[in-house]
Amino acid sequence: MTVNRTTAYATTSGLALPEQPAGPAAAACGPFPRAVVRDLRERSGRSPRVLSFAPVDLVVVTGLPGSGKSTLMRRTVPGPRIDSQDTRDRFDARLARVLPYTVYRPFVRLAHYAGLRRALRSGEGVVVHDCGAQAWVRRWLAREAVRRGGTLHLLLLDVTPGEARDGQRERGRGVSRYAFARHRGAMTRLLRSVEEGRLPEGCGSAVLIDRAAADALSRIGFDG
């Protein structure tokens, strides 16, 4: 499987990912069933304005801290989206003035995953923020996608470490050097694997985007 940079998707107004086999048929194909990789990087903004998935699919948006995942989701996802940053913002609004974040961080995580569980139970297509360092979350989503007869798709935002650091400074919130290095290592391995056509276990497709492709997107939906 090779990554495709030159298909007609470069100038189309929308991109619909093909349906993938689910359930036992997919499991029989091993950890990388009929991988579909679309590379929308380095197209000078001539990339799809819309990404469309099936109504029962799940989409994971991943990338380095500061790469713009939350901004992209807020701007382009009109339907259900689960972003840990939204959960933290709600807690910060009530507690940040009186407590350091480390004290209530476990409760933020608990609330985030409880919200994700509720969203998955709804049966609707959901876009989920993923930091890229917790593979167990993608495995959970992959199982849920199979259970509901859909596909798990990976949307990988590829930016340089410098761009990610700039993004952290712009939002006024960063991560430690150790945490950033851990995320960077995980993302480097994931990106290399996807570029070689090897997707994480349970993922049916991946879309690679850079900052220009992210800026060109206006909607991520479940109409396909």
Image (cartoon, grey):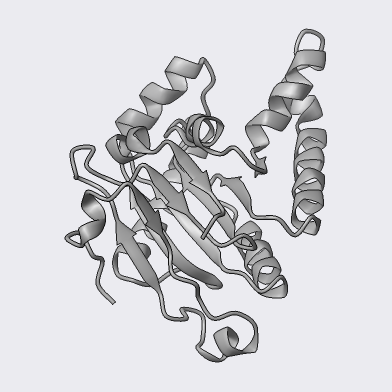
- Does 126 sit above or below residue 171? below
Q: Position of residue 152 (x, y in %)?
A: 56, 64
Q: Nearer the viewer, residue 95 or 219?
A: 219
Q: Position of residue 121 (x, y in %)?
A: 80, 58
Residue sitting at 42 percent across and 80 percent down?
34
- Does 2 sit above or below residue 115? below
Residue 60 shows up from this direction: yes
Residue sitting at 75 percent across and 56 percent down?
120
Is residue 100 shown left or right of residue 196? right
Image quarter of residue 83: top right
- Does 184 sit above or below residue 53? above
Q: Position of residue 81 (x, y in %)?
A: 64, 42
Q: Quadrant of the N terminus?
A: bottom left
Residue sitting at 60 percent across and 79 percent down?
22
Image quarter of residue 158: top left
Is residue 132 shown left or right of residue 216? right
